[in-house]
Amino acid sequence: MEVPKDQIATLIEHGLYDSAEMLGCFLVSSSTVSAETSPQLKAENLILMGDALFHQREHRRAIHTYKQALHHYTRIPKQSSGISRSSLSLSTRSSVNASSISAINENEVRFKIASSHFALNETKAAIAEMESVKTRSLEMNILMAKLHRNSGYNRGAIAFYKECLRQCPYVLEAVIGLAELGVSAKDIISSFTQTSNRSAKVSLDQIDPTRWLQRYVEAQCCVASHAYKGALELFAELLQRFPNNVHLLTETAKVEAIIGKNDEAIMRFEKVRSIDPYTTTSMDEYAMLLQIKCDYSRLNKLVHDLLSIDHTRAEVFVALSVLWERKDARTALSYAEKSIRVDERHIPGYIMKGNLLLQAKRPEAAAIAFRAAQNLRSDLRSYQGLVHSYLAFGKTKEALYTAREAMNAMPQSAKALKLVGDVHASTSSGREKAKKFYESGLRLEPGYLGAALALAELHLMEGRNGDAVSLLERYLKDWADDSLHVKLAQVFAATNMLQDSLSHYQAALRINPQNEAAKKGLDRLEKQMKGIDPDATDENDENDVEDVDGDTEEAELM
């Protein structure tokens, strides 16, 4: 043979895919190999060429080449074929020699075709290719689980995830997938003890003698069912045994961010970066937290670091979107959309897109983005986004339904109660109900400033300025928070106590010099104190109170 096949296999084995592809062009075009007289040899050559293209991520070319190989394989006469029909695909995983070159497996070819379709987001084509594969390996089962889940066939996805755990109980992405699909911890753990042929069972003590894997399953099920307090307790227990585990620290930080423990989450993400400065996983969540805290110097550094690590990741595009939000909302939106194009299942991309559309007064489009996040995995942020989107375009009934859905999913969440209160507060007839929900939220979580600020705003709307002041001052004793000072400044301004209002705006800016609501409020107040009508120069200033509320709600959405 003019071009030795084993040399291409060697190049692929050593990761020299460019050279393998170039050499493959010589191999498949050789005039010494005729498709009519040597269909098996032709198929083998095309498979090697396909492998080189597959590893180069030229998926469309790889699919075409593999299918050509399958076409030639069907022409091999059974009686003259030295190998069985089930073994078509060349394997380059073992050391390259003459025998391994001829050991080929059709299932592997179909798996690579399906994997290429998956990489191109062609889910239906990938499933169709994999359905002809009867005996599946672990990597084939995890692919089938992802394909079925992406298509909305949750029952099929659960079956394939469980099959993965029967083959290997340590496939943690299968554990997370099952938890997110609503499978109980007990059901997931029972899959560990079943062998793949289901003819025998093994003891859980053999698989997980120290029970850390069981605790991990329980933690992920708590996260999926919105039992965030239980999840944090289980993650804390695991962190005592694995104190510098980057994955556990990241999972904990994400839960803390969801429930509003922003300071704790920021410290956790900082620890992750100190242990592994090159990780990008969930760093967009960290970027959102830094934006809420108006810590733009750290946000700038984070984005710079992420770009130098891997500028193609969805997390990096979300972080860029967060960074650009202050400067150019349209650029920020384009980055959020790009993160979704990179990874259609990246939830922070949809959350960020929804927030930006809501700020741009496009609530219908925002609702679509939040609903997409909700369909992937419901959490408090997607519920908040949906409720405020519905309220923004007058769909009060839908907003109330969604808020109640959140409350039922998270009965011990003060934020879910506050969300129901927000819907009632949007109508004058519902304010008394809103007051009860805000107060219930504060009883459940006394330190939840969002509910305190909302209740104070309700007092202000109904003329109970004294109640608003006493409520906010009570919280001010324990929490030095800029948003509390801003709200107090608003209340004092509404009662014409301008000097008190001034001192609270100044206090807010001392805590957070980047607080835009405090800057605008102070500018307006100074004009009033000088006897200048603030509305005469900028008609938009009359909406300052509403703008502050928008900023508060935006922080919660993030």
Image (cartoon, rainbow, N blue to C red):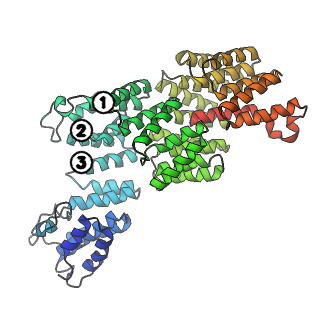
Q: Quadrant of residue 449?
A: top right
Residue at 19 percent across and 51 percent down: it is 135
Which element type, helix, strand or loop, lies under badge 3?
helix
Which element type, helix, strand or loop, lies under badge 2?
loop
* C-alpha distance separating marks 3 and 1: 29 Å
The residue type indicated by label 3 comes to: Leu
Q: Residue 160's spot in the image, x, y percent?
A: 28, 43
Which element type, helix, strand or loop, lies under badge 1?
helix
> Few, some or many C-alpha atoms within 10 Å of disc 2 (few <14, some 14-19, many ≥20)?
many
Residue bearing mark 2: 169
Residue at 23 percent across and 55 percent down: it is 133
The residue type indicated by label 2 comes to: Pro
**Could you tell me which quadrant the N terminus lies in?**
bottom left
**Along the line of sight, which residue is nearer the eye, 357 or 521?**
521
* C-alpha distance separating marks 2 and 1: 20 Å
Q: Residue 80's spot in the image, x, y percent?
A: 9, 73
Taking the image as shown, residue 412 lies to the left or right of residue 275, namely right
Is residue 394 among what the camera can see? no
Q: Is residue 355 above or below residue 545?
A: below
Is residue 87 among what the camera can see? yes
> Few, some or many C-alpha atoms within 10 Å of disc 3 (few <14, some 14-19, many ≥20)?
some
Q: Is residue 353 above or below residue 204?
A: below
Residue bearing mark 1: 241
Q: Residue 277's spot in the image, x, y percent?
A: 43, 46
Q: Is residue 359 above or below residue 304?
A: above
